[in-house]
Each structure stands twice: as structure tokens, then as C-alpha cells.
Amino acid sequence: MLQPRLALRAIQLPFRCLSSLSTRSYATAVHEPEQPLAAESSSFDPGSAFASPPARNDSGTLVRTYKPRTPGVRHLRRPVNDHLWKGRPEHKLTFPKKGHAKGGRNNTGRVTVRHHGGGHKRRIRMVDFFRAAPGPHVVERIERDPGRSAHIALVRSKETKKLAYILAADGMRAGDVVESYMSGIPEELWISMGGTVDPGVLAARTAWRGNCLPLHMVPVGTLIFNVGLHPGQGGQLCRSAGTFATVISKGTEIQQTDSKSTADQGLNETEPAEEEKPLTQTEKQKLERAAQHVTIRLQSGEVRLIHKDCCATVGIASNPNYQYTQLGKAGRSRWLNIRPTVRGLAMNAMDHPHGGGRGKSKGNVDPKSPWGLPAKSGYKTRPKWKVNNAVVVPRPRNHGKRRRGKK
């Protein structure tokens, strides 16, 4: 027998109650609790003028993954930065990026940097790397800069109410108060120290995360970023995401230890003092240079001497989890103005020294660049040296040796 037709109006279809169902999330998100804003005060009080470091959880690397609903999302990895500003940047502090430089071309139109071209339109943010404006500045918000890997912070001066972009330190949030001491120590801080420089009090009041200091004011062992190379200029070192340098020693401390050693020798008058040899001109220059410079160590292990009047920001550059980012698909590279890279072996003979031939072969040619220069280590890339004012070029190991079975 045929079954009777059911009345569809009486059946409650599942899609009629979609509004009452809870929405499914297709990404694993980690929500951090927001920190309360720092209270503003007119008097100089470190407890209220600066925000304390935010509490951190020990969950490890915060990276957002997505459900593989499409092939381009399967391998997508993004760092969790829920504190970033969702709106547009400050229009007065930006200008559009236009011209041939976007495609890797010079003023004559020739390609000077390969693998550049296309990409989404963007506006360049004018970031203040020197931070010469004195006085406390309130952090309005933390923004993402498409032109760099680290984040930037929009700050407003309490005195002049001017806006500016600075490099954000790791842990900096909206409402924090930062200050620059590049123009000198403020009068309120001088009064609190009693009119003299107290290194301990000075470090406790000034060496806070996000503050910009001259290198001679930074305590030894402090992590810094946005370090300058020349006095009077902005920072140039350690500006990418998660980078930092460490202050190892100062020239003033070396002079203090030398003066203490001479004072100890003066107290022991009973013992015969040894005659000190006069310093040579080279040794005097080394001492003067050490007194005017600060020694810092980069993440690579390189140790550099930087002038004591150069600028440096206390802390670590923001967005340290940027290194775990995975774009997921080739299209995102094109959005970032990155064009694909083609192997020389896959090109034609006219396009690359490795091109041409049948199959995977580079024609018995040493590794070279597209312009014919040696590209790998070997006797052709080793530097030349002089022996008795004659240029000697190293030869290959088996050059000039006889083959077996032949005289």
C-alpha cells in the first residue's frame, strides 16, 4: 500500500530555528583578559604615571589555527593579537605608497629588486623612531603596520595633545603611559633625587617598558630595542618583531673602577708604589673611545659599540610570535607584494646559466647567479690575497695532478 502523504506544515524543519542555535567557530581563539587602564595624574608618581607589566599566562606560543574548510586555510597560522585596533589608521600620519618602487624598479623603470610587484594598496605610517618630544604620552591604541612585522602604538602627548606613531613594545596596551628622556631629565625628577644624579633612583623611575632613553641612562643588563647608530638620529637596530639587544657594559663604569683602583693604591702609602708606564697614543684613543660608547650584544651574538648619546627603547619589540606565521597559500604572498621565485634550472638557456638542456641538468656549469657570478663557496668565490705584493688566486685542489696510468 502507498503511504499517505505527510503534512509538511506540521513538521518543524531544522532550519527554522537557526537563530536559536549557537554559532560554530571555525578558528581556535585564545582570549586574554583586558588590563585596566592606568590612572592619569598630574604629579610625577611612578605608581600611577606608568602601567605595571600585564600578567602573562604560561600557555606557550599563542597561534590561531583554522578548521580546513578550504585548502588555503588548512595550513594558515596567525599569531593571536586580539588587542589590535580594528579600524583605520590616523590619516594625518600616513601617506599612500605609489610609484615604481612598489614593483622593485628604479627611476629609469628597470627592475633592480626581483620578486616584487602587485600587492594590495597600502599607506605608509610615519613612525617616530627618535622620540624627541619630552613629557608623558598616553597610548591611545595598538595598531598593525602593513609595512613592518612589529606593531605600532598611537600615542598622544599630555602637554601638547599631539598624536604620533611609535614602535610598540611587547606587552604595551592602550592606556599605558610612556615617556622620552632624550631631551634630558625633567625637573620633577631632579627635585625628587635631591638635585643630584642617583643611579638607582634614576633607573627605577626611567627604565620602564616603552620609555626612550639615551644609552648612558639604560642600566646594565636591560633588554632594549629600536637602538640608534648615530647621535641625533632615530633607531635603526632591533626594529623587527620580537627582536632585542642587551646592554653589557658602559664606559663610565670602566672609568669608575680605574679611579677606585688608583684610590686604593694611594691609601697604601707604606708599600712602595710601582712606577706606571705612560700610555701610548693608541691606548689613550681606546680608553677615550670606550668612555664615549656603550657595549651591547645583539641576538645573533654580535657585540657592538654604540655611542652613549644614541637612543634606545626599553623592552622587546612587539609581536614576538610573528615567526610562527604561515601564509597557507600562494595568493597571500601576492597580496603582500611578493612575486613567485622560479628556479634557474627550470628556465630556458637564455634566461639563466643553469637553464636549458633535457631533463634536470645545468649543463655541467658551476653554480652561478642569473648574471654569471659564482653563487656557492669554492675557489672562484674565495677572496684574493697578496703575497710579496703579487695577487694570488687560489687554484682547485686537483689542479695540475697527473691521472692514474699516465706519466
Image (cartoon, grey):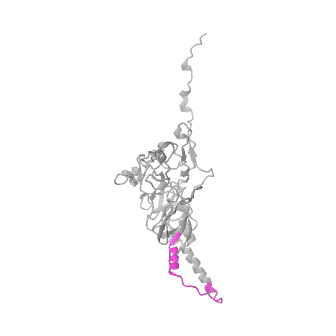
Which image quarter holds the C terminus? bottom right
* Depth order, front residue of 190/126: 126
User: Is 343 placed left or right of 406 in the picture?
Assistant: left
Can I make out residue 368 in this image?
Answer: yes
On-image quarter of the N terminus: top right
Q: 240 and 317: which one is in front?
A: 240
Task: Report x, y in % for residue 62.
Answer: 58, 49
The residue located at (58%, 66%) in the rendering is: 221
Q: Residue at x 57, y 80 (%)?
A: 259
Q: Is residue 271 magenta?
A: yes
Q: Which of the 4 quarters of the picture holds residue 403?
A: bottom right
> Looking at the picture, how far across and down is residue 57, in whole percent?
62, 52
Residue 248, compared with residue 107, is above or below; it is below
| Residue reaching furthest to the top | 1
Query: Which region shows up in magenta?
Result: 265-294
Residue pictured at 58% horizontal, 13% vertical: 4
| Residue 343 visible | no
- How far across and how far down the image is residue 7, in percent? 55, 17
Q: Is 56 contained in the magenta span?
A: no
Residue at the right extreme of this rendering: 270
Q: How many marks?
A: 0
User: Residue 219: image x %, image y %?
Assistant: 56, 68
